[in-house]
Amino acid sequence: MYKKCFGMFLMMLFVVGCSGENQEQSEQTKPSEEPVAVVEPVEADALAKNLRIPWAMNKRNDTFYLSERVGSVVKVENGGQTRQNVVLEKEIASTVPEAGLLGFVLATDFDHSQKAFAYYTYRENDQQFNRVVNYH
């Protein structure tokens, strides 16, 4: 009985000793608090306003093309903006969370071909699907 109690006592001392050592080490290795950088406010001009859930942005020369999740592309140039609804084979499912016109990129030869590629969500037979299409 004495040996069992003595063994348990030694084990407890070992556990307590190890945990105290870890605490000292963790206190010594705590990262020092670094000063927080102060960022000065920057003046910015709005290029486009009244956007409906903008998702992707492309730029060609001085013209920006912004896709909106609800299924339109806004062309921003010369201080004005024009919204064009995107019409695709399958109707865009824009009322479902995380769905709609989600991706939009201009072809590398867009100035010549006027082609773009779109990634969007549609519904069919009560199921939700995604597709990538060539749009022009």
Image (spheres, rainbow, N blue to C red):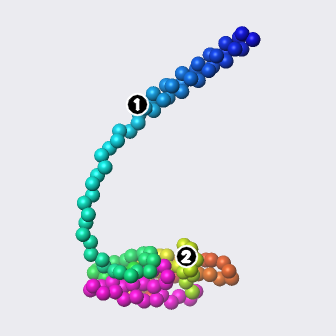
Amino acid identity at mark 2: Ala
**10 Å neighbourhood of mark 1: few (<14), some, or many (≥20)?**
few
Quadrant holding the N terminus: top right
Residue 94 lies, with reference to residue 20, above or below; the image says: below
Q: Residue at x 62, y 77 (%)?
A: 128
Q: Which residues are magenta?
A: 67-90
**10 Å neighbourhood of mark 2: few (<14), some, or many (≥20)?**
some
Front residue of 86/69: it is 69
Q: Tell me which numbered mark, 1 or 2, is placed earlier along the sequence.
A: 1
Mark toward the viewer: 1 or 2: 1
- Helix, strand or loop for disc 1: helix
**Image quadrant where residue 39 sits:** bottom left
Residue 37 position, x and y percent, is 29, 52
Q: Determine whether, in the image, residue 46 is placed left or right of residue 21.
A: left
Q: Residue at x 54, y 27 (%)?
A: 19
- Helix, strand or loop for disc 2: loop
Residue 4 lies, with reference to residue 48, above or below; the image says: above
Which dot marks residue 8?
Answer: none
**Image quadrant where residue 104 sits:** bottom left
Residue 88 lies, with reference to residue 108, above or below; the image says: below
- Identify residue for label 2: 99
- Identify residue for label 1: 28
Q: CA distance from mark 1 to mark 2?
A: 49 Å
Amino acid identity at mark 1: Gln
Residue 76 position, x and y percent, is 33, 84
